[in-house]
Amino acid sequence: MAKSERKRALRGRAGRMKGGRGSGRASAGHVRLWGRHAVEAALKNPVRQHRKLWATREGIDSLDGELPPDFPVEYAEVQDLARLVAKDAPHQGLVLECEALEDIYLDDVLDGEADRPLIILDQVTDPHNVGAILRSAAAFGAAAIITQDRHAPPESGVVAKSASGALEVVPWVRVVNLARALDEMAEAGYWRIGLTGAAESTLADALPSGPVALVLGAEGEGMRHNIEAHCDALAKLPITRAIESLNVSNAAAIALYAVATRET
């Protein structure tokens, strides 16, 4: 069946959204994603379990590929979709409710490709920053991001939209104790570099040729003292005095680029 015919068939089966106002939250135990890149990546993720897609016809037409014949789609107007997401969220005519991704464990990552860096986030709680870091992690081939479960945002539409599809491809490991996780990384052969503007050495000077774990703290507070103590080296990015510091997501992107282009 041609793509245009396929989409006409979907439109014929889909119902119209019926009334009601949403809070932007999914049903208990589920996640609501929005925006073309986030929704499209989730639909293409074979391990993601989907519940329902609300969409405008233009939103469906923007997707790359075709939905399964029995996929639950409900057509809606733009203003109806706005009731399903966070206030003023750019849903682009697509809202997907699905199961949260299954937990990924640190051991699974440490047993993988050691030539790909790890990103460790110490109390980075802004979902926009975490999403942007996921996007950079995907762009520069990071193996995973690791956060503490109590001091990081949950999987959400905001994270997914900021990640622009990377939430579906970059493993996100949540650990109970970040210091203990750093010890496990050291045992697996990773050189742990904490990024801080107070360091003497630049990142380029501190980078080894082997496996690297980059540790970044929250904006303002930076890394906690205990986390700094679990790093093998502290390093800074060579920014000018014209600005005090970089946004944590920008710093992560620059650090990942440095790792990707280092001479081995």
Image (tube, rainbow, N blue to C red):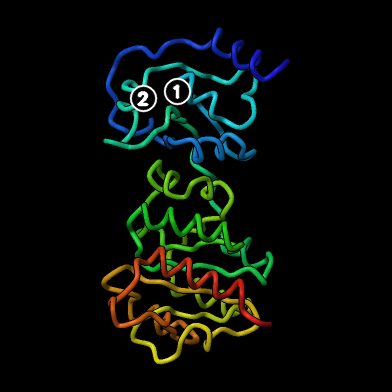
Q: Nearer the viewer, residue 146 or 256?
A: 256
Who's the residue at 30% across and 68% down the image?
219
Residue 89 vs residue 203: left or right? left
Tell me the residue that label 2 is attached to. 81
User: How many numbered discs sit on the rendered protein?
Assistant: 2
**Residue at the outermost right position:** 1
Image quadrant assignment for residue 11: top right
163 is higher (above) or lower (below) than 255:
above
Residue type at tag 1: Trp
Relative to 209, does residue 40 appear above or below in the rendering?
A: above
Identify the secondary structure beneath mark 1.
strand
- Cα distance between the residues tagged 2 and 1: 7 Å
Residue 42 x %, y %: 55, 38
**Quadrant of the image occupied by residue 149:** bottom left
Q: Which residue: 44% across, 21% down? A: 56
Residue 54 is marked as 1
Q: Amino acid at mark 2?
A: Leu
